[in-house]
Amino acid sequence: RYFLVGSNPAETKYRVLKIDRTEPKDLVIIDDKHVYTQQEVRELLGRLDLGNRTKIGQKGSSGLSRAVSAFGVVGFVRFLEGYYIVLITKRRKMADIGGHAIYKIEDTNMIYIPNDSVRITHPDEARYLRIFQNVDLSSNFYFSYSYDLSHSLQYNLTVLRMPLETLKTETSQTRQESFDIFEDEGLSIQGGSGVFGICSKPYEKYVWNGKLLEAVKNTVHRDWLLYIIHGFCGQSKLLIYGRPIYVTLIARRSSKFAGTRFLKRGANCEGDVANEVETEQILYDASVMSFSAGSYSSYVQVRGSVPLYWSQDISTMMPKPPITLDQADPFAHVAALHFDQMLQRFGSPIIILNLVKEREKRKHERILSEELVAAVTYLNQFLPPEHAIIYIPWDMAKYTKSKLCNVLDRLNVIAESVVKKTGFFVNRPDSYCSILRPDEKWNELGGCVVSTGRLQTGVLRTNCVDCLDRTNTAQFMVGKCALAYQLYSLGLIDKPNLQFDTDAVRLFEELYEDHGDTLSLQYGGSQLVHRVKTYRKIAPWTQHSKDIMQTLSRYYSNAFSDADRQDSINLFLGVFKPTEGKPHLWELPTDFYLHHKNTLSLSQTRRSYTYWWTAGVLKHLPLPFDEVTCAENRHKLTVKKFHKYEEEIDIHNEFFRPYELSSFDETFCLAMTNSTRDFMPKNVGIDPSPFTVRKPDETGKSVLGNKSNREETVLQRKTAASAPPPPSEEAVSSSSEDDSGTDKEDEGAVSQRSTPVKVTDTGDNTKITENVVQSTKDVYGVNLSDVPSEDDLSIYTRFVELGQSQHKQDKSSQQYCSKLHLDRVINLVPISSFSQDNIYEVQPPRVDRKSVEIFHAHIQAGRGNMQPPGKDDFLMYREYIRNRYM
């Protein structure tokens, strides 16, 4: 048997799974649903070890040996023989949202469960295993123990923090235990010591190991289920005069109709489109961590293939194969299913930004535009006019070629109108200064204003043919526009505008380019060919040769390696299940019928051609149906009652782990892609604000600086930060959830606080000293006087002597010493306002009542209990505004 022992991060609670190894083809897992303490687990494992030794009482022979230590279970998979278990053996912290860590999988391990004695071998098993492992789990797969990555921040902060009254009926019915994703912000009931937490089912479309967990979903406790997403996750730090603001970008790739560039085009019969990715930008003030007291804002947009039945034939070996429409769809059946999904998740309005070419000598991309316009026009007939789908066609390629037009200016106009229609999410009401000093653009902003802040209603859906280069630039411009509104809503800038060539925008651009490169590699097989700099027409001439290389790499990948990648994705996602006596995966001429269910069986229910949306969706628009409190949505939620003092709901202990010996490298192991200090000017005389426009020679990083420079600095930072971690004791159990905190974290993780160090030869020492010695004016911004004044020196000398004499005196023999005049003891009169003043004791000063009240109010504000401003405060604030601005 295998015993899987999982613990919570504090290693105070444990669960045990028993996996039977005697079944050759079935998976038998026993979960006793019991929570063990550390002592109980040790005793249990000790008993198992003793009972399984070959000879009773024999020392040296172990009855129980550790097979592997892991950070989580990805799932269980079976091909033609028995089951395998897939475990995460190495992880790296990529981002942090309100104290919830997001990890990237760095390495996994597949273990075959059945014993060799019962194994029934099959000749094709090894080939299936090879195909399955072709999906590289160590590239861009992410997970979190306590934050639901498949949902947006808006869903997580509104639905999961619903008032308790609406769920009271649910509490009595639910039997299943669960953990709330916001373990610290449960809602306490009147007079009791209980705290309620709400937990939701993940959004299946963006979960990539749903099929791998299907076998155990209903038999094990939900704490064992760790859902992973595929896409991109990056976090950068924006410093606004020392105030840390974290900008996070999370991209979730859809697991439905997933695949590679030319093999997956358009949509399937269920309305899922190819290359569908939801991108969410989250902005929050990192100085306050908790979700209830902190300021959080997010904006979501989507990219995806044109929702029609279309494909491209790659057997012709042309760089641009002709586009063919595969099925006539006069009633826009597929588009209806697709937009119905979007209305449920995002609400209205749905805005389509179509960047496909409009004018062509030979009709190629225009085929898609014409069909899409017809589909949208047909569907809009039946929707109420205020919730109609908005269609914006814009031929980006044509504008790029013309010398008169600036592409990004035109995109900026589109972005402004889009953000005004959809609004964005922020979890706090508008600040008083924006009510007093309203901005014209702010008042026109759409979305939904609620008592707790603002909600985003509707979404922008961008597409070109591939949804890679043009789409990424358009999404960056919309994201930049939304970022300005987000910064304004958190009170960080005075107008919702951001200029190019500021540190903040350059940081955001790098984040978006990493995001675009990653998504492009996953779908197209190469990095981005056209970047933001290409469209700004400031790219250096060396960029053109790189573009040609990327185009060739993309062509090679599409022609030769995409088919193998498509097979492995189909096997990993459970689209194809190997069965004895049926054709193997590599024998199939096409995977068309695997992705289109209606080719194998006709559905019994036919959807209406006119009422093409799900019942109940229209009633709640513009709010998304998924976020509304109704009976249907309540089935997706589970409520659990916690005790007030349980450690799961104490975010301080969970995040800072005061019970654990920690080192800086592990505490600050967050692998930030960038920080504003990389872009800030090196001289102090220049304004350090990240919203000041800079010339190329003023910045720490050149505007045209290529990526290799950045990789060098990161490498230098890594060399500085990779000090060997302290040796850690082997834990008693193989922990599945979180193995002894962070001590087995990737040692190469970049330390957030480390500084770049240049490693140079000894011969260069003379040169280095010349550069290092700068005037105090350059370094600190002020001229320091050469010598301190005599008064200062005498005070300092007396202070030093006081310390020396006190160290020489033993406290117990102080009275004895006072009688004898020892030679080197100086008797000094205390010069401070404290009556007793020495190294051993200090009498604390008295604090007046008003100061105590101010301090208490400050503490309460940190917990989220803000005191309403009094009459005097308002008068003082108005006076300040009048003097400053009027």
Image (tube, helix red, strand yellow):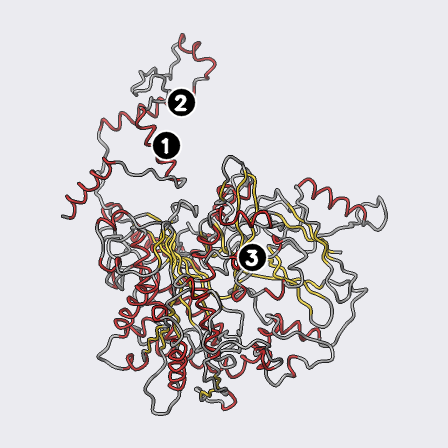
Left or right, 776 with respect to 41, comes to: left
Residue that badge 3 annotates: 635
**Numbered circle sitting on residue 839:** 2
Looking at the rendered image, the disc whose residue lies closer to the viewer, 2 or 3, is: 3
Give the residue type that dot 3 points to. Answer: His
Q: Position of residue 56 (x, y in %)?
A: 85, 46
Could you tell me which residue is drawn at 34 percent across and 91 percent down? 361
Q: Is residue 268 above or below residue 190?
A: below
Q: Is residue 679 left or right of residue 809?
A: left
Q: Residue at x 61, y 86 (%)?
A: 589
SS class, disc 3: loop
Left or right placement of residue 819 versus residue 588 in this view: left
How far apart are labels 2 and 1 at the CA level? 30 Å
* Between discs 2 and 1, the one toward the N terminus: 2
The quarter of the displayed image where residue 591 is located = bottom right
Q: Nearer the viewer, mark 3 or mark 1?
A: 3
Please state which amino acid type lies under the numbered disc 1.
His
Q: Nearer the viewer, mark 2 or mark 1?
A: 1
| Mark 1 crowd level (few <14, some 14–19, many ≥20, 10 Å Cα) | few
**Residue 345, image x and y in percent?**
46, 64
Q: Earlier in the sequence, mark 3 or mark 1?
A: 3
Q: Is residue 261 above or below residue 110?
A: below
State the CA–CA distance, disc 2 to disc 3. 64 Å
Tell which of 675 and 220 is nearer to you: 220
Q: Earlier in the sequence, mark 2 or mark 3?
A: 3
Task: Provide the secondary structure element on which disc 1 rests.
Answer: helix
Whether label 2 touches label 3, CB < 8 Å? no
As rendered, which of 388 and 884 lies closer to the eye?
Answer: 388
**Badge 2 density bin: few <14, some 14–19, many ≥20, Cα 10 Å:** few
Provide the residue designation for mark 1.
856
